[in-house]
Amino acid sequence: MTGSPIDTDVVVLGTGAAGLVAALAARTAGARVVLLEKSDAVGGTTAISGGTCWIPNHGRLGAGARPDSREDALAYLGSLSHGLIRPDLAAALVDHGPAVVDWIEEVTSLHFEVVAGFPDYHPEHPGGRPEGGRSLDPGLFAFPRLGEWAARVVRPAKNPHLTLPETDLGGSDGRIPRPELLDRRARDLRGCGAALVGGLLESLLDLDVAPRLRHRAEALTLAGDGDVHGAGDGDGDGDGGGVNGVRATTPDGDVEYRARAGVVIASGGFEWDPDLAAAFLRGPMDSPASYPANTGDGLRMAMTVGARLGLMREAWWVPTIRIPGDVLFGRPRSQIVLRERTLPRSIIVNRRGVRFTNEAANYNALGGAFHQFDATTFDYANLPCWLVFDHQHWSEYGFAGCRGHTPPDWITTAPDLDALGLAIGVPGEALAATVARWNDLVTNERDDDHGRGDSAYDGWNGDARRRGTPQATLGPLLQPPFHAVELHSGCLGTKGGAATDVNGRVLDHDGEPIPGLYAAGNAMACPTGMVYGGAGGTLGPAITFGHLAGAHAASRLAVART
């Protein structure tokens, strides 16, 4: 160790939304806070995300809108639970989420607005909202307000000066008036996840909580009798022992941080650790689309002190593509495929050349289709798979930001479906039959095979000119040449981690809180189970439980003083 231990009240690990909110909650409650980040930049996956928070029953729908309710939100989550959602955690999300958003607006310069019309991801289920209203966007944040810290926030590959409603994820084409875009660039106004990170970071800096970069927590330290963790707080928070800090590697050597009130693990998931991913995830996941620092550090530390785990098989699944030479954060980038598979004149086929799912379904739900196992071949039936589209699709929409007369070399192109099948290793006759079947279904304006276009969500990312009609996503593949791009099973992060109570306290194997240890964000077992409720379904729980964890940790200081 380098020098004597550094004393503080609360140590927070990670600077994504969960960690920033936890640190801010603890600091505004009067605690001294140390915020550690193992990478050289702030924000993690949050900074490259859409930045939207899915918060039911927030009371911001405006006059004339159909009211939301606690009962509807819980019914919605319950209808999708499959036994994996703990009712107490679902209730905590629904009950506390709106107040957390109000609190963020009080203590930061951020202002949230409803993403108009954005449906829930399963809007036809009980309690769902086809008309949207639960997804909240943080708007734009002026990065010059951060001073020298502006350059230390993770920068996304996409245009950082757009808000989510202006992107394809928000149902737009990303085109805003050029004078407006130039003004945002000149003033460095950033939206999406960058805005959320920027607003939270600014308030922390104002409160003298500066993230300590390149500080990697490697082990939790345990308290003995007589520490604050032996005081007990009347609700099962221990009668001796518990977690009282962390040991971290830093550019200046190893340092021990002692936390009188608690440690909050908000260090993200484990998707970038191949061994952990292979050990826990339910099926193949070979292309994470998240920040590469998510290697399961928090998970390992929690396991070492006896934490109960939950939802380890699950991730925030998403189909991706890999474009040769496209690098982000020093690694080949996995790019999310969303709009391209929803637009008309495109289908997804497996190695047998047949469709196997609703291509326009929400990306998280597609993970189940990708992980279908064939007992006869002892292989995954739908991997590899390809997005197939005709030349009219290419001419009208382009692909993954590419446009022009001729597609780039990484898109496989052939003069007919037989040749395309040969090029990608799919039976040409089967591919041609699948396309013919699809074209017949489109003629009748209904996908009787997989229900594409039936849900209000299906057309949201399709052709905006036809939104609200089947033609937003249904269209025939007729015009040669035909094109194909291989899809991969990726994720935005893992959902499994330390099981917690409603205050974010990590539970041990007996279901009792481990004194002084908290978890939030993708480091905790996801409170929504398999469910991705709607746009912002990762960040809504992250900020809610980040706040609950940080506030509860700070509350333990009062116990120590009595």
Image (spheres, helix red, strand yellow):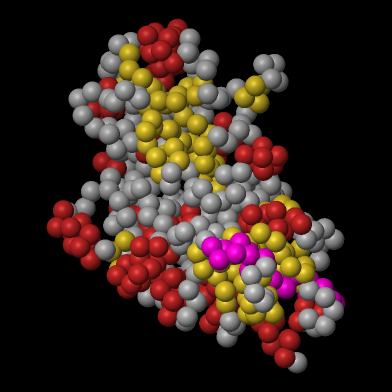
Q: Quadrant of the rendered structure where residue 554 is?
A: bottom right
Question: Horizontal placement of 513 versus 348: left or right?
Answer: right
In this view of the protein, which residue sits in the foreground, 316 or 4?
4
Q: Residue at x 67, y 76 (%)?
A: 5
Q: Which residues are magenta?
A: 237-255
Front-lying residue, 90 or 111: 111
**289 up-or-down from 18: above or below:** above
**Number of disc labels:** 0
Q: Of residues 230 and 550, which is closer to you in this image?
A: 230
Q: Is residue 111 visible?
A: no
Instruction: Residue 555: tell me if it is visible.
Output: yes
Residue 395, picture quadrant: top left
Residue 313 x/y as whole percent: 67, 43
Residue at the image position 40 percent from the left and 62 percent from the top: 152
Q: Is residue 301 magenta?
A: no
409 vs 80, left or right, is left
- 313 w.r.t. 219: above or below: above
- Residue 539 place in picture, x, y as percent: 51, 59
**In-image side of 55 versus 269 (left or right):** left
Where is 170 relative to 369, above or below?
below
Q: Give the quarter of the figure containing the N terminus.
A: bottom right
Residue 184 image position (x, y, % from top left)? 23, 61
